[in-house]
Image (spheres, rainbow, N blue to C red):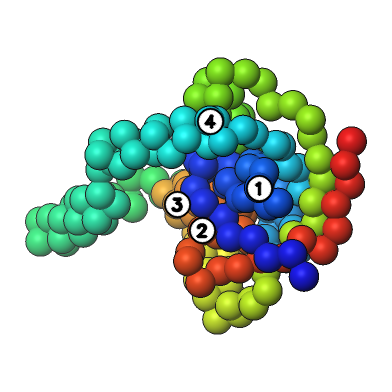
Amino acid sequence: MEKIRFAYGNFRYLVFEFNHQYYLLDRRPCHLIGYLFPPINWLFFQHVYPITSDEYCKIKEKNGRATKLTVSASLGAGLSIFLYNWLRVNKIDITKYFETNLSSFTKVALFLMTFLLTYVLVELCYYSRKRRMTSVLGRELRHLQYYKITPIKIDFKQLLGFIVVIGGLAFFMSMYYFYSGNLLFGLMANAIIFLYLSASNVAFGTESHHLYKINDKILK
């Protein structure tokens, strides 16, 4: 069994070494259903590109510089909590500014339009990560190969927790939007959907305890 472990490349790409050769794994789902249910990506062939050891060093150097400039995610969470408490203490209800009397058809149409825009933004995010990677390497990605990669041990608890929590939040906020017509909940639902679709790459992670195996490959 051919075991591999991933290292971080960027949001879209991971790096792994196999038979003394470095490769980039493209985590963007190859099929639409892969966005909706990330584990199903293990059943499909993923795009893989060979890179040199010098190019791998460029990626490591770039990530080393980026780490120093990264703003902690806890800062964003802290600001959100501060804003929520400030609104609550001052008894400011912002939801009333988003109340509407839209028809059912209009609510569905608006939600679908926003959902489509959300999907386009996710694709743009993946595309920008591709351009960033080619900028780091100094060339376009070439010699596409196809690998079918699956985890050796699946952490069902973590995976299902992500799907249930994020998917559940999006579902209930969407339902409340359709029930009340409050645009704020529709926007919040699509914001969570954006996070869910963007995180479809969780099927392949870089945690030290996550090992993967190559089940099949197609070389061109």
- Return the mark for residue 20: 1
Secondary structure under tag 3 reads: helix
Q: Amino acid at mark 2?
A: Thr
Near mark 1 (Cα within 10 A), the count class, few <14, some 14-19 or many ≥20, is few
Q: Amino acid at mark 4?
A: Asp
The residue beneath circle 2 is: 206
The residue beneath circle 4 is: 54
Question: Viewer-nearest of labels 3 and 4?
Answer: 4
Q: Residue at x 82, y 63 (%)?
A: 215
Earlier residue among tags 1 and 4: 1
- Return the mark for residue 145: none
In three-dimensional space, the C-alpha distance between marks 3 and 2, rounded to whole angstroms, equals 29 Å
In three-dimensional space, the C-alpha distance between marks 1 and 4, rounded to whole angstroms, equals 13 Å
The residue beneath circle 3 is: 188
Q: Is residue 177 above or below residue 211?
A: above
Q: Residue at x 76, y 48 (%)?
A: 46
Q: Nearer the viewer, residue 2 or 170?
A: 2
Secondary structure under tag 2 reads: loop
Query: Cβ–Cβ below 8 Å for labels 3 and 4?
Result: no
